[in-house]
Every structure is written in C-alpha cells, then in structure tokens.
Image: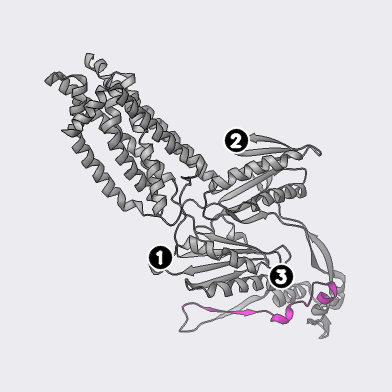
Amino acid sequence: MKLEKFIYSILQSPSKSLLVYAIALGLFILSVATFPSGIVKAKMLPSKDSNTFSVYIDLKDGSSTEQTREVGSCISKILIKKDLVTNISVFIGEGQPLDFAALVKQSALKDKESQAEIIVNIKKANNRDISSYNFVSSIREELQECNKYEANIKLIELPAGPPVLASIVAEIYGGNSFESRRDFANKIATVLKKQKTLVDIDVMADKKFEKFEIVLNNNKIIKSGVSLEQVKNTIYIAYKGIELSVVNEKDSQSQIPIFLRLDNHRVFKSNTKNDILNKLSLLKLINKNGFTIPLSELIEVRKVIKEPTLTSKNLTPMINVIAETNKDSQIYPLLDVREKLLENFSKDFDVVKSDMLNLEFKNTTTNEYFKLVWDGELKVTIDTFIDLGGAFIIALVLIFFLMVIYYKSFALSGGIVLASFISIIGVIFAHVIMDLFTRDTFYLTATSLIGFIGLIGINSRNSTLIIDFTKQLIEEKNLTINEAIAKATATRSKPIILTVLTMVFASSLLATDAVFGGLGVALIGGTLISYIVSMFFVPVIIKNQIKKILKN
C-alpha cells in the first residue's frame, strides 16, 4: 500500500519525523496567532436573525409627552417607508409588552413622559435578502436624524443567548456623591463613544431638573365650601383621566372602556408658572352654595428641584454606562477602551488593574475612589469561555489518566492527549475558511468550544485503535515496530476516514445554523484534521513508546 510505504519512510527517517513535528508546531502556532491578529474573533453567540426588533427612546428628564411623541413620530415615519417593515407599534410614556429582550432592560419600569418604545415587525426571513441584524445596522445612523431634545435612541434586537441589560455594561462604583459618580460615568461614556463599533451609548443616571408642583391650600378650600376630594378628583380627571364605565358590543371581543379626560386644551402653552395658573383658572368648581370658584384660587404652584433616581447593586450605589456593538464582538472594542482608559485617566488618577479586565481609580487631587466593573453580555461571554476552557482541561486530564491506567505509560498517554489537542488546528482554520465564504463575520462561539471538547474523545479513540493494532501485529506477526505502526495506520485508515466522513456530512447540516453553526464547523474541521493527525503525527509520536508497553 502506498500509504503504508509513505508512513514507513517517515518512521525510518529521523529528519522526516522532525519535519512532521515542525509542521504540526508551525500550524499550531499559526492557528493560535489568529486570535491576537483578529483573523478569528471570539463571541459567545452570533447575532440572531429574527422578525422583530425594538427602538427605545429616552429624552432628558422633564421632557413633555408632546416632545417624546414628536421624536417617536419622526422615527415611525422613517421606519414605515422601509420595504422590509410590515408594521410598527409605538408606546409613549410606558414600556412595550415584555419580550425576551425587555425582561432585563427595565421596560416594565418605564412610566415617564420622556420615555417611549417602538416595536418594529419586519418580513419573514424567507421573504427578505438581508438578515435582521444587518437591516438594523443599516438604519441606525438614519434614525439618529430624529435626535431632538437630547433624545437617546437605541435599537434593541432579540438576544441569541441569555438576556442582558446591554452588550457592554460598565458599572461605576464609588465617589463622594452621586454627582461625582455621574461625572466620572460621563467620562467613561466619552471614551466608549470614540470606538467605531460601539453604538447606543447611554449613561443611566438622571440629571436634576426643575418642575412645578401643585400644592392644595387647605385653608382656602375649607373657607370656599369645596371639599378636598372634589379638588383632587377634578385635577386628576382633567389631566390624568379616569375610566368611568364600559360598553358592551356584540362585534367586540371584550368590553370597550369609557375614558374621561380633557382634550388637548389641557396642555400648557409654556413651562412657566403664569401659564399654569392661567390654565387652571379655566377649571371651575361648584361649592355647596352653588357658586363657581376657579381652581387656581384653591391651589399654589411651586417650582421644585426633581432629585435624580439613585440605583444600587448589592446595596452599593452605582451607575450603569451601557453600549451595544455593531457587527463586532464585545471583547475587542472593550480591550481598546481599557487601553484608552489607562492612557487618558493616568494623568488625574492612580489606575489599578483588578479582576482580569476591571479597573480601580483614585483621584490624585480629591482622593476620591472609583471602581469600574464590566458586566452585560461581555461578562457572560468571558464566564462561558472560562467555564468551557475549564471543562476542556478537565476532559484532557481525565483522558490522560484513563490512558495511563490502560497503557501504564505516562509518555504514551501524553502523546495521545497531545494528538487530540492538536485538532484545534482544524477547528480554527475551519472558522477562517467559513469566514471567507460568509457575508458576516463567522465567530468562534461557545458552541464551537463544545464541538472541540467533543472531538477529544474521537481523536483519542483513533490513536487507541492504531496503538492496539500495532501491538497486536508485533506480538502475532513478529513485525518490527516501524513496520507494525505503518501497517496498523494504513489498515485503520479506512474505518477512520469513514467515521470522519460520517461526522462531516452530519455536521454540515449544522454549519449554516445561526446559533449552532460554530459547533458544526468545529466538528467538520476538527474531524478532518484528526484524520491527518492520526495518519502522520500519531505514528511518529508513539514509535519510541511502543517498546515500553510491550514489556507490560
């Protein structure tokens, strides 16, 4: 057999054996180098192609419903002109009905006039030529044209994995006051905004603003002969509104509410005390004597400062700075941001690295202490890769000790584990090739690592088949070690390649899947390279250890 002769020639020649080691080492170094070079990028899960997404609108605190509606109307007019958009739903002053993404994005807590959410439904995947996440990316800049009244416009997609507050979340702790903590958070946001692939950046901290407060004048109300409840109910019904009753109709699936409130004439002309009093003076109340009394005579209008909302985590005050990624993994812009923070903040702060990526800052002038902790999908990604990396190491260790028990040789067992580990070359290069043929970036994902862990058992089995058959040929046929290894490898090549092809064909069904594509590509590339490793690398690495297991 040609394969047997070729393998035998490699085993007989020390220079060819060294060449096999050199090629394996070179390919391994090249594959690992794809990560720092950015040729292969890591991400927990790729973006999900769905039929819906949301738009979150946040104006500055104190903005009116009319201003929020104006921004929402502007965005709606742009969206409805898009061919892919089928319909939209706008929610002013409240969050949308909860979906998978909104579970942790605090949609249920939104009740301010300055907030709005828009649900956008697009055509089904088989009726469009572009993925939903690419469509969202293409309209993001256009929607920013509606950025009036300091509005923050964020596009929210359904997550492929666990829902998180945002792709990147910077938790800011410390500071002597809320204001200093917010100022520091704004500095962090400024650095984030300079990253090209980071979008929808927002500091989740309110600012103080002036508002008017209506205070009932109890003395005047008592003297006027009007009850307190009458005054309160009049103001509530006029401006907030109330559901009085319901109407039943045979063509309606549910009861139709009757809602009472003043029309748009209730809206104040301007945000001044005089205009508020003038508008309230138009509301008349009838006392028990039948006289009408203007509402403005029974109340006082005071200007007050609205304090910002304080947030905390684990009973520690903090502020979130959030950002989304645009066609990029979270880790790469974060690494750039971290370097910029170390560079820019070192002038005014003593910066200390802590907990892998987190940073601690101490102001050299005021001695204020701040702590920056990264969270969001970024943290989920890092934790997942660490856990899967730990599982991979444990799998290698367990297989090593199983081989030691079976063969009673540490060196041979180490060779089997090394041969299994080298299959990572195929996993990485398969991702490189797939990235060249796909429109979007093909990431090394968590499912890719799961596939790599599964390959360890397959590769170890191939090595075990060759070693056991080699041992049998030496004992029964009295062949030399090199002859037995060459013959065993060539003989086992057919069942090994059949197993490999079966795995490749089965995994090809997963290769194009949005979530499990990494698993399919990892299995295809890993099994293909495992065949080459079994045919050429395993024979070279075991030839010096066969004598030891023959004595046992």
Q: Secondary structure at mark 2?
A: loop
Lower position in the chain sequence, tag 2 or tag 1? 1
Mark 3 and mark 2: Cα distance apart in space = 43 Å
Residue 80 lies, in percent from the top left, at 53, 74
Residue 43 lies, in percent from the top left, at 48, 47
Q: Is residue 458 left or right of residue 102?
A: left
Are circles 2 and 1 on residues that touch, CB within 8 Å? no
Task: Check disc 3 and give the amino acid type.
Answer: Ser
Q: Is residue 275 left or right of residue 194?
A: right
Residue 97 lies, in percent from the top left, at 53, 65
Which quarter of the rendering shows the C terminus? top left
Residue 384 lies, in percent from the top left, at 47, 42
Q: Which residues are magenta?
A: 253-276
Mark 2, mark 1: which one is toward the viewer? 1
Task: Check disc 1 and give the amino acid type.
Answer: Ala
Mark 3 and mark 1: Cα distance apart in space = 38 Å
Image-quadrant location for residue 240: bottom right
Task: Check disc 2 and give the amino acid type.
Answer: Asp
- Above or below 520: residue 418: above
Q: In the rendered image, which residue does mark 3 sit on?
A: 64
Image-quadrant location for residue 396: top left
Mark 3, mark 1: which one is toward the viewer? 1
Q: Residue furthest top?
A: 551
Q: In the rendered image, which residue does mark 1 sit on?
A: 125
Lower position in the chain sequence, tag 3 or tag 1? 3
| The one of 321 and 145 positioned closer to us in this rendering | 145
